[in-house]
Image: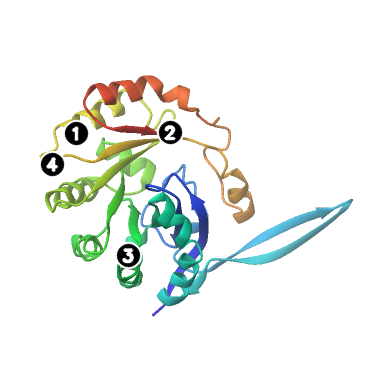
Amino acid sequence: MTGTIFDIKRFTVHDGPGVRVTAFLKGCPLACKWCHNPEGVDPAVGVASKTVRVGSTTFTSNESVGYEITPDALMCEFRKEKIFMDESGGGVTFSGGEPLMQTAFLVETLALCKKEKIHTAVDTSGFAAWDDVEAVRNFTDLFLYDLKIMDDALHKNYTGVSNRLILENLVCLLKTGARVRIRIPMIPGVTFTGENMEQTLAFLTELPFPVEGVDLLPYHNTATHKYKRLRIANPFEEMKSLSKNDLSATKQRFEAAGLNIINN
């Protein structure tokens, strides 16, 4: 069996507890207009142009976007950093794209991690069949679960899909006793609006089962070069990055409601 990934990042500290290795799986059923990893949307291995300038001469070549890998080969990459993961209480995080688009590959790799006592986290949009979520749950220590827009019509407009399945899966996942941290991408004028923050806060505080906490993820425009390399239009190219200070008032409101907040 093989899976398709497009990156492995080492020494990550914002994708779960401790020092982690994050594997990015290709393929995503959403089409978020602010996507930070546009190279991960297409499930297939792609091609992108790479331009290097040396003096007055420009060299352009094509390079692969993504590659196939077996669970055993991916485990070899994880083991290289195991000492750092063990010392810091870290582990491995599977992100994307949407990891649940490659459930069989994900489950097999997660099972190998559990066999070697490596802490596992899955960063997901929640837009997947419940059977896939359930299959992954049995091998996952922590879910990093995205909540973007509470209004269903706006969610469809900005991500291409309804949020109903996402919200239903979240409730079902919490009901099983799974550990879940909510992640909210704070996109000015889209997710980061007074109305959406109020609706999100109301939803979270009224859940029948509590979440472990909430991560507020400020928008960063660092993906601009990816869009150019892939020759994809970037609707948010001119939007400025947010800082932690921009989110301080929202952080205080969520904390006042009893939620554990991390402002990344």
Residue 39 is left or right of residue 98, and the answer is right
Cα gap from disc 2 to disc 4, whole angstroms: 27 Å
Name the one closer to the observer, 240 or 136.
Answer: 136
**Residue at figure coordinates x 19%, y 33% from the top left:** 203
Dot 4 corresponds to which residue?
A: 209
Residue 51 image position (x, y, % from top left): 74, 56
The percent coordinates of residue 109 (x first, y second) are 36, 70
Residue at the far front in the pictured view: 87
For marks 3 and 4, give the one nearer the viewer: 3
Label 2 or label 3, whichever comes before in sequence order: 3
Quadrant housing the C terminus: top left
Disc 4 element: loop
Q: CA distance from mark 3 to mark 1?
A: 34 Å
Q: Which mark is residue 203?
A: 1
Residue marked by disc 3:
117
Are the residues tagged 3 and 4 within 8 Å (C-beta)? no
In this rendering, the label closer to the viewer, 3 or 1: 3
Mark 1 → mark 4, Cα distance in angstroms:
11 Å
Question: Could you classify mark 2 by the number of other residues whose Cα lies within 10 Å: few (under 14), some (14-19), or many (20 or more)?
Answer: some
Amino acid type assigned to the residue bearing label 1 in the image: Phe
What residue sits right under mark 2 in the picture?
187
Which-is-in-front pick, marks 2 and 3? Answer: 3
Residue 146 located left or right of residue 74: left
Q: Amino acid at mark 2?
A: Ile
The part of the image, by quadrant, that contains residue 101 is bottom left
Residue type at mark 4: give it: Phe
Amino acid on which the number 3 mark rests in the picture: Lys
